[in-house]
Amino acid sequence: MLKDAEWADVCAAIRAVASGESYLAPAIARRVVAQLTTPNGGTLSGREIEALRLLATGAENKEIARAMRLSEATVKSHLLHIFAKLGVSDRTAAVVTALAHGIITLPET
């Protein structure tokens, strides 16, 4: 359970556990499924996910490098690994695939 769970979710979790089942918060379940269903089976590292989140905001390599305190060459390397793990060939496809698999979410405005 997450600490900000709704009361109805807490009750459902208690009922499930009391009847011998397990319970996983939907938000956590989505993340687990996304990790397991990442195309090509590669699990993205934390830094790759961070770069992907910045990419989803429209950030250029230079901006990603600055935000993550990396060189642009390292950012390019991260992006190539992301593309390979997601089975895509460009930035847009990487973001769309990551969103579709629940790997990242769009920032709230």
Image (cartoon, grey):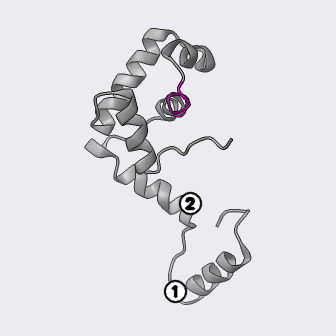
Give the mark nearest the N terminus, 2 or 1: 1
Badge 1: residue crowd in 10 Å (few <14, some 14–19, many ≥20) = few
The residue lying toward the viewer, choosing from 21 and 88, is 88
Q: Amino acid at mark 1?
A: Gly
Badge 2: residue crowd in 10 Å (few <14, some 14–19, many ≥20) = few
The residue lying toward the viewer, choosing from 94 and 38, is 94
From the top left corner, tell me how far across and down residue 39 is, in percent.
29, 45
Residue 80 sits in quarter: top left
Dot 2 corresponds to which residue? 27
- For the point 32% across and 38% down, the residue is 86
Dot 1 corresponds to which residue? 20
- For the point 46% across and 17% down, the residue is 75
From the top left corner, tell me how far across and down residue 85 is, in percent.
32, 36
Regarding mark 1 in the picture, which secondary structure is present there? loop
- Name the magenta segment's main secondary structure: helix
From the top left corner, tell me how far across and down residue 109 is, in percent.
68, 41
From the top left corner, tell me how far across and down residue 102 is, in percent.
47, 51
Residue 5: give its label. Answer: none
Q: How many marks?
A: 2
